[in-house]
Image: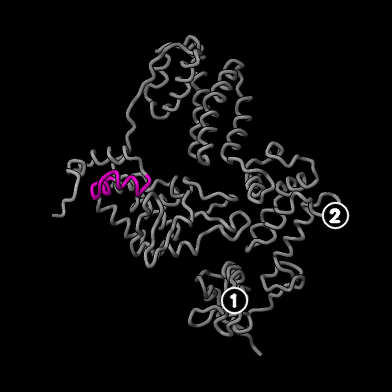
Amino acid sequence: MSRTRVRTEDLFCTRCGRTLRPGANHWPEGYICQCCMTRALEIYGTCTGCGVERLTPGLAPDGGKLCTDCAGGLGDFFCERCGQEARRYRRGICGRCVLTERLHGLLDDGTGSVRDELLPLFDALRQIKRPWGAMTWTGHSHVQHNLRALARGEVPLTHDGLSQLTPWRSVAYLRDLLMQTGILPPADRQLLLFQRWLAEKLPAVGDAEHRRLLELFSTWHVQRRLHTLADRRPLTSDQIRQARDEIRLATTFLDHLAQRGHTLANCAQADVDAWYAGRYTARRLTHAFLRWAMRSKHAPALVVPHRSTSNPAPIAQHQRLALLRQALHREDAPLQDRVAAVLVLLYAQPLTRIVRLTTDDVLREDDEVLLRLGDPPSPVPDPFAGLLLAHLDQRPNTKTATNPNARWLFPGRRAGQPTTSNTLELRLRHLDFPTQRGRTAAIRHLVLQAPAPVVARMLGYHDETTARLAAEAGGTWRHYAPGDHSR
């Protein structure tokens, strides 16, 4: 009996249309790529054929999900060890069993059992919905080394102990997991990263006097400010970037003085003017170091130059409305990016505030959807209401060990953390959504439609900010006499 040979140009995934190579997986519906197959073997629900709740990788003609029995020809996916139906990774066992076996070896305290203090981490990792990510992470040699060091007591199970491990990005991820599972007490992640960076930066300064001044500046100004901000709310990556830039610029400014034959104690106004000449914007953060030096008597009285750094001009109203329509109806863009873009263009929210929103800030009262940005909550009009509710059901990064029960509206890849404002900005910039100019246009339009204090309370702005923006935009609400004007 002859076999029908399939031409290479006819091999494509029946689900995503991707071109395939000979030997690709073949299901009753057609050829299927490895990505679509992996995704299908992670879908659980009610089979539209038999109505049973189980793994539903098959696809019915009407688009419904089918179990392996109703779809037929998909294969057997029952784990030979735990009996659960899931994708099998090796030796006929599922990914969760493979991961559990690996974690037993990595977290072994030397007695053949998992260290008691690390049991919460062990349980959190092996119970994730998508074990492949944890298997990839624990497969790295440096991760295995760090986990074994903690399990065997070679490194203290404390924040200071973790600071001894490398590389720092992987250690930061592990620290987040340990804090989320309650093994380590809560600590500001960004502050810890800055302190680690500072401990590596300062010893590298060659001049002893420069190093002493930078240690004083970082202790009594930079870190003091960061601790104050951390007491109010978690620090952002932008605040840490500013702190690092202040240290870097202070270091470079001291080198600049040395090249001119001066020290900070005998710094002249000409030295300061030469430092800022032609590069004011790039060196503006040196202000903090110079003002601290003058207050603490490390430098003589100097004049620190100041130039206005006003926000860029907002986009026109017709451009803003066109971008809003794109965000609402652009099906090729990720849902989370479209929701974030509308929050910027419609509610004038900065990205730093958007990433701190939680699912509790989305309210449903009768048939109305509200968004808690201030007091009172702001109404959410259609079709954005449907878009927002759909995003609630499809939030990313909730199937791993990092954020399985996250309440963040935009969960991040770090345990217990939302996505960063920088990440969100890059995603929106890739889709050609101007964040700063779009937000400026939105708030200026809103203060022309309603009194500035009302807009401030609803959107979480300060009264003085909206009043100033209203005056700049030519608003006339403040000229109206108070009282009832309906008669």
Eye-nearest disc, 2 or 1: 2
Magenta span covers which residues?
444-460
Quadrant of the rendered image containing residue 314: top left
Name the quarter where the C terminus is drawn: bottom left
x then y, percent, for residue 229: 50, 35
Would residue 441 be found to the left or right of residue 70 on screen?
left
* Image x and y of residue 82, in percent: 75, 70
Residue type at mark 1: give it: Thr
Q: Is the stretch drawn in magenta largely helix, strand or loop?
A: helix
Q: Is residue 65 left or right of residue 80?
A: left
Label 2 close to label 1 by CB (< 8 Å): no
Q: Is residue 4 above or below residue 403?
A: below
Work out whether 221 lies above or below 267.
below
- Mark 1, Cα crowd under 10 Å, few <14 / some 14-19 / many 20+, is many
* Classed neighbour count for the residue bearing mark 2: other residues with Cα under 10 Å, few (<14), some (14–19), many (≥20): few
Residue 317 locus on image (x, y percent): 25, 51
Disc 2: which residue = 112
Q: Quadrant of the N terminus?
A: bottom right
Magenta region includes residue 151: no
Q: Position of residue 413 (x, y in %)?
A: 57, 52
Q: Residue at x 27, y 39 (%)?
A: 467
Going by the numbered disc 2, the residue's amino acid type is Gly
Q: Residue at x 63, y 83 (%)?
A: 69
Q: Is residue 293 left or right of residue 152?
A: left
Checking the image for residue 56, the label placed there is 1
Q: Secondary structure at mark 1?
A: loop
Please say whether residue 199 is visible from this viewpoint. yes
Q: How is the image coloured?
A: one colour
Within the magenta stretch, is there residue 452?
yes
